[in-house]
Image (spheres, rainbow, N blue to C red):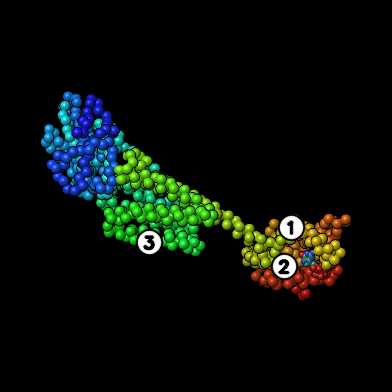
Amino acid sequence: HTPTQLIQDNFSELTDFTIGYYIDRTEQMSFEQIEKQAFQESPNSISLGDSAKTTWAKIELKNTTSNATTVYLHHPYAYHNRGVDLYEVVDGKLTRKRLLDMDDKSTQEWMYRGSAVFDIQLGPNQEKTLFVKSWSFSHQWFSLNLYGENESKRALLGQFTDIALLVGMLLALIVYNFLLFLSSRLKEHLYYSCYLISGGFWIALSYGLLADLFNIYGSMAFKWHLSLVSMPIFLLLFMMDIFETKKKHRIEHWALASILILLMVNFLYGLFDIVNALKIASPLASAMMLVSFSVSISMFIKKHVIARFFLIGHILFLIFSTRALLFYNGKVEFNYLNSHGVGLGIVLEALVLSLIIAYRIRAIKSLKETQTELRLQASTDPLTLLFNRRYFSIAANQELKESQGSLCIAIIDIDHFKQVNDVYGHTAGDKVIIKTADIFRAQAKKQDILARYGGEEFIILMPNTTLDDALTQIENIRTTIENEKMNIGLKHSLSIRISAGISEISPRKIDLDDAINQADKALYNAKNNGRNQTQVYKTNQ
Ligand SMILES: Nc1nc2c(ncn2[C@@H]2O[C@H](COP(=O)(O)OP(=O)(O)OP(=O)(O)O)[C@@H](O)[C@H]2O)c(=O)[nH]1
């Protein structure tokens, strides 16, 4: 016998009470047969597994007031049923019957944004027995609640805020990763986005957000549960891409690829027979978890830094989805964490995996920095830290292409440098080269391109400079060096002299090599002319 629920004056709500249930395993018993069965006592929220597709609930009601009243019976998870039927019995007689079929629009007047809501009229002091047939696609779980008019409206408001929040978080990640994909063209962002889309869609579908917003339910919606199969497909592709298994880890690659193929086959099969495909999906998902978990451990052992994110993500998903699996099969209590386990697991795993994306962006950034550093090293002379000859050619040619005005080029050579080496040693020679380079650097203009051209030879390209200006500039440098008492750690300081040759490049008239040859000729003249001077190239030379 099911205990009677008393409806008193100012009735507000009953959300925790006792009902009776009966599982019709034949799935075709008539109401008359059902009425005669013994019902099992149970809380008003219940999960019974997948062998209880057709389950009847029984609620005894008594209006204890002397006024007629209306209460509202809510079935908040109606959206993922095939149908919900309500039979009302007074004094052993069937007085009203409502058959709500999720695939038949004409029967859906009691559906309100995913919930089934039935008004129950109770006369003064009247007793009524309600029989609710919950007819599910696979697993049976439902909740039945009773409300007064105002509480009924309130219960329907904001019912899916939590789910909207979960889906919203995933949506933000989806957009972000898709933008990352567009800017980087890295496939990992695309796979991760698709994984998030599948997960987010499944959550919106399974926890009623799509029913709430778009009235999507019934067998049409049931098909879309295949998103639970496409999610691990994209997760596997993401893993293969991130760990570069195809190139670097053959065994792991084949383990992931095999389970990927099975999932894809099941996905295709699901397009034709969703009920059976979803039955296979469960063990397949467990196998997939086992494989991807093992691969993550193997990567962890191989010291792949990203593996720990997969491990943490997988563990979180495993904990929550295991609870959900036990819940769907009626093995653990009906509470929020259990009934929403898969969704929470998906969101937590997705958030942890998003750390991978952050990590990868950081790794790519430091790779770029290393490349810049290498490029810099390749273009610099290690002794003086001036540009080297190779880089000078590239930079000077670029400048020639872009420059409109007059440019000058100067080649500068230290006089009798061999003697410095011979008298004070090669190390002292090096120091002289460094000090001379420092003076060049200090005296050169910002726009000048300055390089070490050979052993004790330097070159300067001076953009937007006339021959006169160039001569003044180089002469300034020469006299500065001449007057410099170079201290290179010897007992006495050294005085150094330089000779220089300058030539003018009017853009497009001659190329860089010709200009360098001309400057070289002028330098030769300076050396021949007694050194310690600057010569300008003249056409008759
Ligand atoms: N210490 C040192 N010596 C170098 C380096 N590169 C070239 N040299 C030396 O620089 C000297 C250049 O000598 P030369 O080209 O004969 O001319 P010079 O003695 O400078 O005389 P002039 O140029 O004719 O005034 C050689 O002895 C080279 O060995 C270097 O990086 N360090």
Find numbered disc 1 in the image and state the secondary structure of the residue it sits on. Answer: helix
Front-lying residue, 214 or 406: 214
Among numbered discs 1 and 3, the one appearing first in the sequence: 3
Q: CA distance from mark 2 to mark 1?
A: 21 Å
The mark closer to the camera, 1 or 3, is 3
Disc 2 marks a residue whose amino acid type is: Glu
Front-lying residue, 53 or 130: 53
The residue under the point 19% across, 25% down is: 65
Q: CA distance from mark 1 to mark 3?
A: 64 Å
The residue under the point 43% across, 55% down is: 292
The mark closer to the camera, 2 or 1, is 1
**How many other residues sit within 10 Å of disc 1, few (<14), some (14-19) or many (≥20)?**
some
Among numbered discs 2 and 1, the one appearing first in the sequence: 1
Count numbered badges in the picture. 3
Which mark is on residue 261? Answer: 3
**Ligand 1 shows up in which quadrant of the image?**
bottom right
Q: Residue 104 at what x, y percent from top left?
A: 20, 49
**How many other residues sit within 10 Å of disc 3, few (<14), some (14-19) or many (≥20)?**
few
Q: Which residue is mark 1?
A: 441
Q: Which residue is mark 2?
A: 504
Tag 1 and tag 3, C-beta contact below 8 Å:
no
Q: In the figure, is residue 504 to the left or right of 88?
A: right
Whether residue 62 is situated above or below residue 175 in the rendered picture: above
Q: Residue 60 at what x, y percent from top left?
A: 20, 33
Q: Residue 534 at what x, y percent from top left?
A: 80, 65
Outermost bottom residue: 540
Residue 383 lies in quadrant: bottom right
